[in-house]
Image (spheres, rainbow, N blue to C red):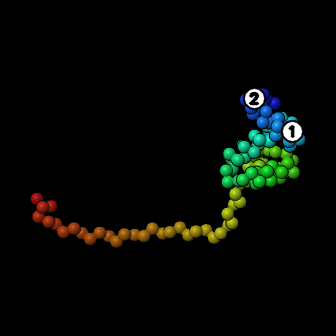
Amino acid sequence: MGIVKISDLMHENLRVAGNALSRSINAQAEHWMRIGMLAELHPALDHREICQLLIRAEQAGGFDMATVSASLAPAPAPASAPTPTPTPTRRPAAAPRKATADARA
């Protein structure tokens, strides 16, 4: 465990929010950090989806960033018939150039 220095105002905000939600200051800070980290990594998710994700992670054995990221990975596309490779088209042979007076000189 490490020490993180925060402002007095943030500490007070953590204390108030932690008391309101029956969390310790450290637990509230960790909760906000998880929410913020997931919001930055997955900007398409809203707060409700992030909270549901955290609940599923907890039910699966606890928050693990690798597990959470894997659950958010897009599903692989269904297998389909391979796309045929286009065959290159041949250009018609160029017609021979007629010699001009300028070219002969």
Name which residue type carries label 1.
Answer: Asn
Task: State the mark number for residue 58.
Answer: none
Q: Is residue 19 left or right of residue 69?
A: right
Q: Which residue is drawn at the image coordinates 85% and 45% (left, top)?
A: 62
Task: State the mark number for residue 8.
Answer: 2
- Residue 73: percent from left, percent from top: 71, 54
Secondary structure of residue under mark 1: helix
Placement of the C terminus among the 4 image quadrants: bottom left
Task: State the mark number for residue 19.
Answer: 1
Crowding near pointer 1: few (<14 within 10 Å), some, many (20+)?
Answer: few
- Residue 98: percent from left, percent from top: 18, 69
Give the Cα distance between marks 1 and 2. 16 Å
Q: Nearer the viewer, residue 56 or 87?
A: 56
Quarter of the rendering containing residue 63: top right
The answer to whether residue 40 is seen in the rendering is yes
- Residue 38: percent from left, percent from top: 72, 46
Q: Nearer the viewer, residue 105 or 7?
A: 7
Q: Which residue is drawn at the image coordinates 71% and 60% (left, top)?
A: 75
Q: Nearer the viewer, residue 75 or 39?
A: 39
Placement of the N terminus among the 4 image quadrants: top right
For marks 1 and 2 on the same chain, the one whose residue lies earlier in the sequence: 2
Quarter of the rendering containing residue 90: bottom left
- Residue 97: percent from left, percent from top: 22, 67
Name which residue type carries label 2.
Answer: Asp
